Image (cartoon, rainbow, N blue to C red):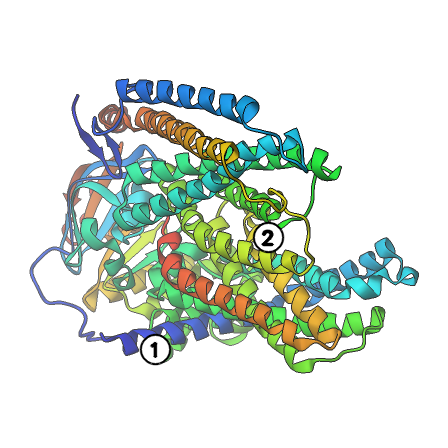
C-alpha cells in the first residue's frame, strides 16, 4: 500500500509531545509524569517491566485515557482539551482483539473499515496483505487461532491508514511468518509517512525494527535511546 | 489547607469540613420546635374526623411526606443536570443526598399510607393513584441509588447515576400520569378527607405538618450532603504520595 | 459541518450499527433459539398458573402478553449489550469515529426489529393458546409500534448505563422495569380497548407512549456519548 495520503501533514512539529504527563486509572497514577517526544516517520520501541505503564501510555496517546496534568499533544491535538479528536487518526492494536467473535473475518474488517469511514477497497487489500483472503475470510473470528485473530485486528488497523500506529505487543501470539508481516507493515507505514510506537517484550526483533528505544519504569520514561542504522542498542 | 487538583477529584476547602455548623444547629432547634408544634396541634388540639376518626391525623405527616419525596426527586434531577453540564462535584452530591432523603420520605409516605389505610378500609394497601405512584417512585429511586453506589470509580458512578437522575423527572411524570388515568377509571378509594373540606384547626395542623416536615427534609439533605462530601474528600487526598511511590517502582531494578 | 450533514452521518452510522447487530443475530441466532422460546414458555407458564378453564386467562390476555414481551425484551436488550462487552470492542467503537448518537440509534433500531418479530410471534401464540379473537387491528398495530419504540429507546439507554459492569445482568432489570411500567399499563389498556371493541379508550394511551418514546430518543441521542466514555 503506497498512499500519499493528504491527511499526513508535512510539518516539523513532533507527532507526540508529552511533558510531565500524568494519567490516572481510578486513583492510581499509571503514568506519573512522562516526558516523550516522537517525530514523524519514527519507529519507537517502548520497553519496560510489566506494570510499568506501557499499555496505559499507548491508550493515552490514542485518546482513550485522560491526561490529568502535564502537557500532551498528539498529532497537533491537545489531549487535555479534546482527546476524542485524535482517535480517528490513530490506530491501536490492543490486548483485546476488538473483533466480534460471531462475525466472519471479512464482516469484521469491512465493518470496522466502514466505521472508520475509510475506503472499502482498503479493507479487501488489507485482508490480502495479512494473508486473510481466501478460505479464512469467511470463518467466524471466534473459531480462529490467536495468531489469526491478531492478523485480523491488524487488518482492521491497516485499512484505516492511521497517521500514528500504536501497537501493544504486536508480535505476541504470532508465528514467524506473522511477525515478518508485522515488521514489513511497520516499515512500509513509516516509509509512507506514518509514525509507529510499539511496545514489546520481543527485544531482539523489535530493536532491529526501531529507530528509538524508550524505557518506561514506574510510570515515567527512564531513558530514551536512539539507534543508528543497524547498530544494536545497549 | 492546600488545594490540589487531581483531575476531576478536587481536594480543596471549598466545601464543608465537618457535618455540624452553627447554622444547622439553629436549624435543628427550629425543626424540633416545629415538630413539637405539629404534635401539639396534630395529635391534641385538632379534632378527629367525622368519618375516619382519629386515623385522619396521619394525614398531617402523610401528605407533606409525599410532596417532599417529589421535591427530593427534583433536587436529584437538577443536581444531575448541573453535574453533567458543569462537572460540578458539589451539585452531584446534592443529587445524591436528595435521592437518599427522597427515598426515606417515600418510605415514610408508604408507611403512613398503610397505617392510614388499615383503620380506614381494613386493608393495608389499595392501588390508589397516590400510593401506587409512591411505590413506583421508590423503585425508581432504588434504581438511581443502585447505580450511584456501584463498586467503581467516582467518575463512572457519578456520570451513570446522573443520567438516571435526570430522567427521574420525566419518568415520575409519565408514571404518575399513567397511574392516575388507570386508577380513575376504576374509582378506587383515595387516602384523603372524604367529602368535607379541611378547615380551621385541621387546616392549620396540615400547614404545620408541611412546615415541620420540610424543615426536617432540609436539615437531612444538608447533613447527608456533608457526609457525602467528606467521604469523597478522604478518597481525594494523597496524589503526590501516590505519584512518588509509583516512580519509586521504576527505580528498583 | 452543518446540522443536516451531522444528521446524515448520524443516520448512516446508525444504519451501519443496526446492520451489524442484525447480522450478528442472524449468525448467532440467539433471539431465535433462546428469546422466542422463552417468550412462548412464559405464555405456557401463565396458563399453568391461571388455569385456562376458569376464564381468567381470557380476561388477562392483554396483560400477560405484554409481560411476556417485557421480560423477553429484557433478554434481547441484555444480549444487545453483551455482544459489545467482548474483548476490546468498546475501545474499538470509541476509536472508530462513529458518532455515539448514531450507535445509540442503530442499537435501538436492531432491538426494535427483534422485538417486533417477537411481538408478532407472541400475538400468534396468544391467539392460538388463549383463543383470543382479534379485533381493532389499527389500534393493536399502533400500540405495538409505539410500545416497541418506547421499550427499545429506553432499554438501549439504560442498557448503556448498565453496560460494562459486572452487575449488568441484575442492574438492568432494576433500572428498566420501573421505567417501563407506564408502557405496560398503557399497552395493556390499549389492547383491552381494542379487543373489547372500544378503541377510542385506547388511543390516549398510544399518545402517552409516543411521548415516552420521544423523551427517550432525545435522552439517548444526547446521553449515549458521555456514557460511552469511562471517565
In the displayed structure, B29 sits above or below C213; it is above
C73 vs C62, left or right, is left
How far apart in space, not on screen, are marks 2 and 1 (Cα)?
A: 33 Å
Q: At x 30% / y 26%, what residue is drawn?
A: B233
Between B82 and A220, the one nearer to me in the picture: B82
Asked where in the image residue C67 lies, by quadrant, the reply is bottom right
Tell me the tag on residue C177. Answer: 2
Of residue C93 and residue A199, the one placed in the foreground of this image is C93
Q: Secondary structure at mark 1?
A: helix
The percent coordinates of residue C216 (x first, y second) are 46, 62
Between C171 and B52, the residue placed more toward the observer is: B52
Q: Quadrant of residue C13?
A: bottom left
Packing grade of label 2 (10 A; few <14, some 14-19, many >=20) is many
**Going by the picture, which residue comes out furthest to the right?**
C53
Kindly identify the residue that appears in the image at 47 percent across and 41 percent down. B67
Disc 1 target residue:
C8
The correct choice, above or below, for A213 with respect to C51 in the image is above
Residue C210 location in percent, x, y?
Answer: 51, 69
> In the image, residue B177 lies at what x, y percent?
54, 58
Amino acid at each position: 500500500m503506497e498512499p500519499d495520503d493528504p491527511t499526513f501533514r508535512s510539518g516539523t512539529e513532533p507527532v507526540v509531545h508529552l511533558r510531565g504527563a500524568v494519567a490516572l486509572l481510578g486513583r492510581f497514577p499509571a503514568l506519573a509524569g512522562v516526558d516523550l517526544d516522537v517525530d514523524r516517520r519514527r519507529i519507537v520501541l517502548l520497553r519496560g517491566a510489566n506494570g510499568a505503564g506501557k499499555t496505559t501510555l499507548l491508550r493515552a496517546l490514542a485518546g482513550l485515557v485522560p491526561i490529568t496534568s502535564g502537557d500532551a499533544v498528539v498529532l497537533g491535538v491537545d489531549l487535555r482539551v479534546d482527546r476524542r479528536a485524535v482517535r480517528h487518526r490513530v490506530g491501536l492494536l490492543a490486548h483485546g482483539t476488538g473483533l466480534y467473535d460471531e462475525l466472519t473475518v471479512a464482516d469484521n474488517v469491512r465493518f470496522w473499515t466502514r466505521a472508520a469511514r475509510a475506503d472499502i477497497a482498503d479493507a479487501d487489500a488489507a485482508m490480502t496483505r495479512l494473508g486473510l483472503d481466501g478460505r479464512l475470510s469467511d470463518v467466524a473470528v471466534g473459531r480462529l487461532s490467536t495468531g489469526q485473530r491478531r492478523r485480523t485486528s491488524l487488518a482492521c488497523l491497516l485499512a484505516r491508514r492511521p497517521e500514528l500506529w500504536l501497537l501493544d505487543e504486536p508480535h505476541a501470539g504470532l508465528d514467524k511468518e506473522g511477525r515478518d508481516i508485522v515488521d514489513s507493515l511497520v516499515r512500509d507505514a513509516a516509509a509512507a509517512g506514518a509514525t509507529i510506537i510499539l511496545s514489546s517484550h520481543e527485544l531482539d526483533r523489535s530493536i532491529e525494527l526501531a529507530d528509538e528505544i524508550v524505557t518506561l519504569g514506574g510510570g515515567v520514561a527512564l531513558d530514551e535511546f536512539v539507534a543508528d542504522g543497524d547498530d544494536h542498542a545497549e | 489547607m492546600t488545594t490540589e487538583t487531581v483531575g476531576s477529584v478536587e481536594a480543596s476547602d471549598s466545601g464543608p469540613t465537618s457535618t455540624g455548623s452553627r447554622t444547622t444547629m439553629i436549624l435543628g432547634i427550629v425543626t424540633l420546635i416545629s415538630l413539637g408544634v405539629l404534635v401539639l396541634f396534630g395529635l391534641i388540639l385538632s379534632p378527629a374526623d367525622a368519618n375516619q376518626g382519629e386515623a385522619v391525623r396521619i394525614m398531617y405527616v402523610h401528605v407533606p411526606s409525599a410532596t417532599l419525596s417529589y421535591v427530593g426527586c427534583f433536587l436529584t434531577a437538577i443536581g444531575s443536570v448541573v453535574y453533567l453540564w458543569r462537572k460540578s462535584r458539589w451539585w452531584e452530591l446534592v443529587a445524591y443526598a436528595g435521592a437518599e432523603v427522597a427515598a426515606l420520605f417515600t418510605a415514610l409516605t408508604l408507611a403512613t399510607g398503610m397505617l392510614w389505610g388499615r383503620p380506614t378500609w381494613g386493608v393495608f394497601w389499595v392501588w390508589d393513584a397516590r400510593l401506587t405512584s409512591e411505590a413506583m417512585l421508590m423503585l425508581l429511586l432504588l434504581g438511581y441509588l443502585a447505580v450511584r453506589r456501584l463498586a467503581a470509580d467516582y467518575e463512572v458512578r457519578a456520570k451513570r447515576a446522573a443520567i438516571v437522575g435526570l430522567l427521574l423527572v420525566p419518568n415520575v411524570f409519565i408514571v404518575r400520569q399513567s397511574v392516575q388515568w388507570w386508577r380513575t377509571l376504576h374509582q378506587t378509594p383515595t387516602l384523603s378527607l372524604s367529602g368535607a373540606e379541611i378547615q380551621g384547626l385541621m387546616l392549620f395542623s396540615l400547614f404545620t405538618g408541611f412546615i415541620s416536615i420540610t424543615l426536617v427534609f432540609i436539615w437531612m439533605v444538608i447533613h447527608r450532603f456533608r457526609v457525602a462530601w467528606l467521604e469523597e474528600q478522604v478518597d481525594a487526598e494523597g496524589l503526590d504520595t501516590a505519584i512518588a511511590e509509583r516512580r519509586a517502582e521504576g527505580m528498583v531494578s | 459541518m452543518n446540522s443536516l450533514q451531522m444528521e446524515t452521518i448520524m443516520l448512516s452510522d446508525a444504519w451501519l450499527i443496526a446492520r451489524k447487530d442484525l447480522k450478528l443475530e442472524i449468525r448467532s441466532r440467539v433471539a431465535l433459539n433462546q428469546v422466542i422460546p422463552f417468550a412462548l414458555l412464559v405464555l405456557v407458564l401463565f396458563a399453568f398458573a391461571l388455569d385456562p378453564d376458569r376464564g381468567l386467562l381470557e380476561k388477562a390476555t392483554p396483560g400477560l402478553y405484554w409481560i411476556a414481551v417485557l421480560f423477553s425484551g429484557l433478554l434481547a436488550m441484555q444480549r444487545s449489550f453483551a455482544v459489545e462487552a467482548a474483548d476490546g470492542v468498546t475501545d474499538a467503537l470509541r476509536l472508530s469515529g462513529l458518532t455515539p448518537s448514531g450507535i445509540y440509534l442503530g442499537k435501538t433500531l436492531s432491538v426494535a426489529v427483534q422485538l417486533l418479530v417477537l411481538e408478532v410471534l407472541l400475538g400468534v401464540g396468544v391467539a392460538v393458546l388463549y383463543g383470543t379473537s382479534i379485533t381493532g387491528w389499527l389500534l393493536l398495530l399502533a400500540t405495538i409500534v409505539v410500545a416497541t419504540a418506547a421499550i427499545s429507546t429506553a432499554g438501549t439507554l439504560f442498557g448503556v448505563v448498565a453496560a460494562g459492569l459486572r452487575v449488568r445482568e441484575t442492574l438492568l432489570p432494576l433500572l428498566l422495569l420501573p421505567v417501563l411500567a407506564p408502557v405496560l399499563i398503557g399497552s395493556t389498556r390499549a389492547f383491552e380497548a381494542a379487543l373489547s371493541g372500544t378503541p377510542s379508550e385506547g388511543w390516549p394511551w398510544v399518545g402517552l407512549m409516543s411521548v415516552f418514546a420521544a423523551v427517550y430518543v432525545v435522552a439517548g441521542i444526547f446521553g449515549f456519548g458521555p456514557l460511552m466514555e469511562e471517565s
